[in-house]
Image: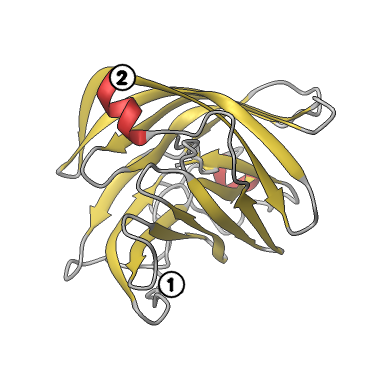
Amino acid sequence: MGFMQPVRSSCQTAAFRWVRVADLFPLTLLVLMASPAAAGTFTPPEGCTGTFTVQMLGCTVSNHYICAGDPPGHKWRTDFAQNGAVFRSRIDDEAQWIESFDLNPDMRDVLEPGAADPASFTGLLGTGGDTFDFTTLSDAGVRERIAGYDRLTGEVVVVDGVTLKRTEFDAHATREDGSTIWHSKGNEYIHPEWRLFISGRGQWDGGDGSGFLPYDSSPISFAFPGEPGFFSTTPLFECDSTLSQADGVIRVRD
């Protein structure tokens, strides 16, 4: 499951990622290329090795890496918005969200054991569809039940030389009393060999009664070790320093 990035991003639990509302929904001015000022390079934790960087719409750049001390198949990513790192997550080889860290303010969420219907990247590839139903628990003691599906659409797209398969998803998070926390639906991408989701475009409902809002965090370019832009901390697309920052955050899978 990939739903962002919440990101899941999703959910197979695909990885989820936190992204500021203002980064996903520039209200007036869409500047396709950000200013190169404040360019930087991400340094992964000791014992970890970078695999690729993806620049996305919505003023987000995501750096992916693996760490020697993790179980086989586990993968990390750290996402940067215009003002710095905003999210870090770890997924397993089934793209299940193992843990995630919202970095502003700091908050950790973990996948609880014993999922009613664990997400399965293997199942998605094998049958073209996968359902999921699992719970997460935050440091603050907030438990979310996340249920939904991922489905391959049959479409294959090439982004900056990288071949991806498009998915359709629907994911709904509820509190223990059954009330809605958020609901998201739309399209994402998977890379079968990398065994992960990459975010796309969709709609997000924050459960406040305002209904669905559109977002687009589609991938635009990839960089690999030794290439320009690898492990950059500077997002390039749809960024503008004059845009107001929203207080809220939304979860998007990727």
Residue 64, position as x, y percentages in the image:
35, 60
Q: Identity of the amino acid at label 1?
A: Ala
Near-viewer residue (26 or 10): 10
Where is residue 234 drawn, in percent x and y?
42, 65
Distance from the alpha carbon under mark 1 to that under mark 2: 43 Å
Query: Image quarter for residue 223?
Result: bottom left
Image position of 245 (left or right of 100): right
Which residue is drawn at the image coordinates 26% and 29% (left, top)? Answer: 165
Q: Residue furthest front?
A: 114
Residue 190 falls in image quadrant: top left
The local secondary structure at tag 1 comes to loop
Q: How is the image coloured?
A: secondary structure
Residue 219 x/y as whole percent: 34, 42
> How many neighbours does mark 2 have within 10 angstroms: few (below 14), some (14-19), or many (20 or more)?
some
The amino acid type of the residue labelled 2 equals Gly
In the displayed structure, 36 sits above or below 175; it is below
Which mark lies nearer to you, 1 or 2?
A: 2
Can you say which quadrant of the picture contains the C terminus? top left
Q: SS class of the residue under badge 2?
A: loop
Name the residue carrying label 2: 128
Residue at the limit of the structure toward the right, as seen here: 177
For the point 56% across and 55% down, which residue is it?
Answer: 99
Q: Which mark is residue 162?
A: none
Find disc 1 in the rendering and name its residue: 37
Total number of numbered discs in the rendering: 2
Residue drawn at the location 18% of the way across and 66% of the way down: 227
Q: Is residue 89 above or below residue 219?
A: below
* Whether residue 207 is visible: yes
| Quadrant of the drawing holding the N terminus | top left
Sequence-first tag of 1 and 2: 1
In the image: residue 69, left or right of residue 27: left
Whether residue 204 appears in this view of the structure is no
